[in-house]
Amino acid sequence: MHTTMQRILTRVQKPARYVGGEYNQIVKDRAAVDVRVAFCFPDTYEIGMSNLGMRILYGVMNAMPNVWCERVFAPWGDMEAEMRRAALPLWALESHDPVRDFDLIAFTVGYEMSYTNILNMLDLAGVPLRASERTGLHGLVFAGGVCCTCNPEPLADFVDFFSLGEGEESTVEVLELYARAKAAGWSKVQFLQEAAKLEGIYVPSLYDHAYGPDGRLASITPHPGAPARVTKRIVRDLDRAFYPVHDLVPSTEIVHDRTNVELFRGCIRGCRFCQAGFCYRPVRARSVDCLTETAEAALAAAGSHELTLSSLSTSDYRELPALTDRLLAYCDGRKINLSLPSLRADNFSRELMHKVQTVRKSGLTFAPEAGTQRLRDVINKNVTEAEILETCATAFAGGWSSVKLYFMLGLPTETDEDVLGIADLVYKILRTWRETATARKRGCHISVATAYFVPKPFTPFQWEAQIPPEEYTRRQRLLKEHMPSRSVDYKWHAPELSRLEAVLARGDRRLGPVLEWAVRHGARLDAWDEYFRHDVWMDAFRACGVDPDFYTGAIPEDAVLPWETVDVGIGRRFLLRERRLAYEGRTTPDCRQRCAGCGADGLNEGVACHA
């Protein structure tokens, strides 16, 4: 380790974030590999090491004999200050080599508020921010993740190419192409032109965006040889896909310090606000045999005390009873807790409840999202008040006394009656506890959280306006005034952060200068309350002549959308139909009951969704 680095580490919080050396980390001989990848997560170590996608791709890349992939995380503020003071460039954990020495710099991007971290990490590494300023084949920057798949345009000035969709297969193809290009001495332009021919690879420099007099995007013109639309990649057979069994064991506390097994990808539900539910389609599941073998091997390798079955909607996995029986047979004797997050109120059973409380009883979490049935129908939540109360009664009768509930404020068509419906539902849950609870000594504790609705690309609500911050604040106060104070802990999201998230989610290439200005003037770690600086962002918009309200207003249904170059498998006609059904208050059944014709099965060679 560099002497300056050692000296700095004694002056910062949690130095273990920056040194590597974890059990199961992968170290290779520099001279024995052809391609080195700095795999960057644009947030802190604790967040990045909890990200399953990063762990999967770390294993995929390092399984290639000629590739060495190393991890890089965003430093906390104290560490960044020390690095800049000592002129110490950002480094990778495995080798401690500077990021600027790597062939490729990859980012996985899961949320919009990490965009400034991407630019700040490049700046810390001494790498030019703009793609146009990086002229050679060395040090190319590429990115993937749900944000890049759904709308890569705000980052188009800074990223050389994007990997759209799931990267287990496409990343291998990209690295093989790069190894060939490096050996043959290709130019950057030549490599990017060839990369654009790979399925799922989007090269923004090969597309021209033109704007009309009204400020809206007027046209997107691909260069010769570039596809008009780039289709996201999916893994069709998850049983055969790579999974990180011999996973990294963090050397310091992380957010989700446990073993994860992924049940399935996608979601059968079709909630009209949920970007992940649409963009991860089609639904593809792992078999019980595969999951059992993976879980047992991963637990043995990592020594975890908790196993989490992860998905967008865990209780929708068809074979969940059989799977939990097999996993509990392994976990019970070893005092390993089996955790089932992302449960739904309409299929939570007493049998399942008794299974998950065998080792350790934890709180239950449900997301009704809206307080009235009318609004739940608008958003296609497909859960009734009776089902919510029945689920709570089942939990309270089984010994639970703690429930977390998530809602949104500002959903399309929402009225004050809908807002007050949240408080009314909470009162009914409290009454249900009094009528059914078996564990009364600790009392009932209900946590309620409300988020500020953000319209996202590739959802039926992508054309909707976001309510103004002052209206969101009024509705939040209205709810707080009517919320039962005893036994209820009510939290809400700050409007400024969600407002900016909406701008970045539906933004176009004109946000590139705004991002750069904001970073140059101190924006970073925006997802953390202690670092988010709303004033810097407002100054950035003014300095660049960009009106943020333009991106949060309603979008005409016939407008050219910045993300139209991307094909996630969901047809525009389907999204418009779902939007109209929302305004009619009509629901669409889940994918098991009836195929809604979204088009995602076309990505899976016509195989129907299943889980």
Image (cartoon, grey):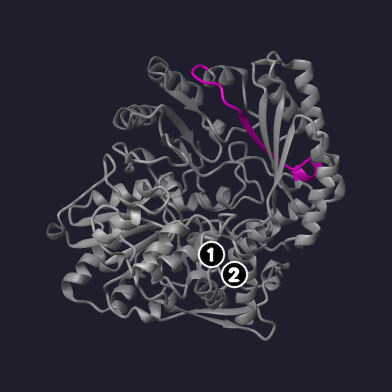
User: Vertically, is 315 above or below 242?
Assistant: above
The numbered mark at residue 407 is: none
Q: Nearer the viewer, residue 283 or 387?
A: 387
Where 588 falls versus 7 (above or below)?
above
Q: Residue at x 70, y 28 (%)?
A: 445
Work out which residue is located at the far bottom of the displayed protein and give it: 213
State yes or no: discs 1 and 2 in contact (Cβ < 8 Å).
yes
Q: Residues within 10 Å of mark 2 (few under 14, many from 20)?
A: many
Judge left or right: residue 380 versus residue 533: right
Q: Position of residue 310 (x, y in %)?
A: 48, 37
Q: Residue 585 appears at what percent x and percent y?
A: 79, 47
Please name the residue that numbered disc 1 is placed on: 151
Provide the secondary structure element on which disc 2 rests: loop
Counting from the top left corner in percent of width and height, residue 601 is at: 50, 49
- Name the N-terminal-most of marks 1 and 2: 1
Q: Counting other residues with Cα less than 10 Å from the Cα at mark 1, is it few (<14), some (14-19), or many (20 or more)? A: many
Q: In this picture, is 303 found above or below 496?
A: above
User: Mark 2 highlights which residue?
Assistant: 507
Residue at the left extreme?
A: 31
Q: Secondary structure at mark 1?
A: loop
Q: Does the rendering let one see residue 455?
A: no
Determine if the magenta segment contains residue 381: no
Amino acid type at image mark 2: Gly
Q: Which residues are magenta?
A: 358-377
The kind of residue on which mark 1 rests is Asn
Quadrant (top left/top right/bottom left/bottom right) for the N terminus:
bottom left
Where on the picture, by quarter, is residue 213? bottom right
The span from disc 1 to disc 2 (Cα, nearest Å) is 8 Å
Out of 320 and 10, give the one closest to the viewer. 10
